[in-house]
């Protein structure tokens, strides 16, 4: 199995002077002579090849790098919301974070993990704000 994000090349190729069709991809590259590649149905079904290429391209777009970036953006938004909500919940319920040593020993025993202060765990860097600037982009030939 190969992730769809790793497919960079996926195209239909005709062979034998346009009578046969095959799929040229990273999975099975086809050389200039038309050798190799994926040739479903003995290469005689151009409609089948077009359908497979279309379906793989849809999957590549839906589950590939673009989809991974979309998923990462979604996860970042969720984490940003949690970074705001967790301190509010801790205050509301009166919970201490990090917990004191007695609580850590009671829950984890002798193998208690290290606990960092919440300010270090959920620190969110603010994006820099830029002041508006004006630039003269007049072409030197326009003034003539």
Image (cartoon, rainbow, N blue to C red):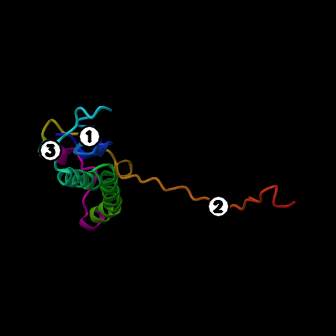
Element marked by disc 2:
loop
Residue corresponding to mark 2: 131
Residue corresponding to mark 1: 15
Q: Nearer the viewer, residue 13 or 60?
A: 13
Compared across the picture, whether 116 is left or right of 126 comes to: left
Residue at horizontal 24 percent and vertical 65 percent from the top? 93
Sequence-earlier tag: 1 or 2: 1
Sequence-earlier tag: 2 or 3: 3
Q: Which of marks 1 and 3 is in front?
A: 1
Mark 1 neighbour density, 10 Å: few (under 14) some (14–19) many (20 or more): some
Mark 2 neighbour density, 10 Å: few (under 14) some (14–19) many (20 or more): few
Residue 115 seen in the figure: no
Element marked by disc 3:
helix
> Exactly how many numbered labels are in the figure?
3
Residue corresponding to mark 3: 40
Q: Nearer the viewer, residue 127 or 92?
A: 127
Q: Position of residue 69 (x, y in %)?
A: 34, 52
Q: Which of marks 1 and 2 is in front?
A: 1
Residue at horizontal 25 percent and vertical 55 percent from the top? 54
Q: Which span is picked out in magenta? A: 91-106
């Amino acid at each position: 199995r190969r992730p769809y994000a790793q497919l960079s090349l996926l195209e239909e190729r005709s062979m034998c002077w346009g009578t046969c069709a095959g799929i040229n991809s990273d999975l099975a590259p086809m050389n200039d002579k038309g050798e190799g590649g994926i040739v479903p149905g003995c290469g005689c079904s151009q409609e089948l090849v077009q359908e497979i290429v279309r379906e793989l391209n849809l999957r590549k777009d839906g589950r590939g790098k673009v989809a991974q970036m979309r998923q990462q953006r979604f996860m970042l938004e969720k984490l940003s919301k949690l970074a705001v909500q967790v301190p509010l919940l801790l205050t509301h319920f009166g919970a201490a974070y990090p917990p004191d040593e007695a609580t850590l020993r009671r829950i984890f025993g002798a193998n208690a993990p290290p606990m960092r202060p919440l300010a270090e765990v959920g620190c969110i860097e603010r994006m820099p704000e830029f002041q508006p600037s004006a630039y003269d982009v007049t072409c030197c030939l326009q003034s003539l």
